[in-house]
Image (spheres, rainbow, N blue to C red):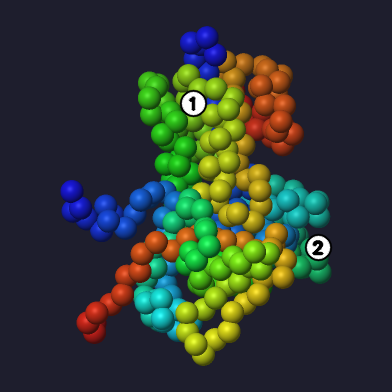
Amino acid sequence: MNGRPAFILLDANNFYVSAERVWRPELANKPVVVAGSRDGCVIARSDEAKALGIKMSAPLHLVRQQHWRSGLIICSANFPLYGGASSRLMRTVAPVGSSGEGTGARLDRSGYRRRDWPNTDPGEARLLRGQAGARTLSPMCNSHSIGGLAFTRRCSSNRVFRAFMFDTRLSRMIANFGS
Amino acid sequence: MMSSLDDIAVANPPATYLVGSGGDSMIDAGIWPDDVIVVDRSKKAVNRSIVVAIHEGEFVCKRLVIAGDVVLLCPENTRYSPIVIADKESLIIWGVCTYNLHRLCPV
């Protein structure tokens, strides 16, 4: 990296659903949504639920009506559980960033944690991704978390993409990048 | 210095979970009903590890036995018989049991 500061952005797929699946193995490979706003709308969807065409923040009464035949499982949001999973995720990946200064983390509205690590390399990012997924979230889905690396925080999404060509699931992360 | 339970039993805090034991299938390994098992999800399971695995959609605590091509989840109680894992790829090891908290006096 030639001493240039670099940043890893780590995101977890379907974070709330993944956290539910840690303790409920029967949810694996099934369409699952997590409902928020007093069970008013969808705030997280498993890949299977996305495949059914369920949109983010869709009204729950409509979703239930349209998809109950497909065996859709609806979980009421359990934020202490997700907070715990998020904290474990952050602590799992923390050692990589502990040597550098200027680290910061925040939890945004959609539940994705974001953190910058100075002076890291792509290999480390990849390692981090594997560790974070295997140790914190469910082993039932392989690619639970995504690590992206870039040279500046507000770099072009193209650059992130080239740095992490091996991860084709980066597109959503790029959309979250940069703010 | 070993000053707290965390120092003794929790090698990797973010990957460590406490799980209640439900049945009597692991009595000979010293895991009794209603014990609290310390499970480390970052440890790699090896032959004869006591693991929490997912079998038919449910959590089970068993001893993992790998004998050549055969993978077994063995209970430690002669009243139960081992579970033979037909499809090794589908076996999910949720975590490896590292310690057991057993109550020695009544509440």
Instruction: Specify the amino acid type for callout 1.
Output: Asp
In this view, A53 is above or below A92 = below
Question: Callout 2: few (<14), some (14-19), or many (20+) C-alpha neighbours within 10 Å?
Answer: few
Q: Which of A176 and B4 is in front in this view?
A: B4
Q: Where, quadrant-wise, is the N terminus of chain A in this rendering? A: top right
Q: Mark 1 lies on which chain?
A: A
Q: Residue B11 at x, y = what percent?
A: 35, 51
Estimate the x, y position of residue B89 in percent, counting from the top left: 70, 59
Dot label at residue A66: 2
Check disc 1 and report the residue beneath it. Answer: A116
Mark 2: amino acid: Gln
Q: Quadrant of residue A36?
A: bottom right
- Quarter of the picture containing the C terminus of chain A is top right
Question: Is the residue marked by circle 1 packed among few (<14), some (14-19), or many (20+) residues within 10 Å?
Answer: many
Name the image quarter holding residue B29.
Answer: bottom left
Query: Looking at the rendered structure, which numbered label has been put on residue A93?
Result: none
- A149 vs B66: above or below: above
Q: Distance between the residues labelled 2 and 1?
A: 41 Å
Residue reaching furthest front?
B68
Do callouts 2 and 1 mark residues in contact (Cβ within 8 Å)? no
| Res A107 visible | yes
Residue A6 vertical position relative to residue B1 in the rendered view, above or below = above
Chain identifier of the residue bearing label 2 in the image: A
Describe the element under mark 1 as helix, strand or loop. Answer: loop
Q: Position of residue B100 (x, y in %)?
A: 35, 69
- The residue positioned 36% from the left and 64% from the top of the image is B99
Of the image marks 2 and 1, the number of the one nearer the N terminus: 2
The residue lying toward the viewer, choosing from B90 and A37, is: B90
- Where residue A137 appears, x then y in whole percent? 55, 51
Q: Which of A170 and B74 is in front in this view?
A: B74
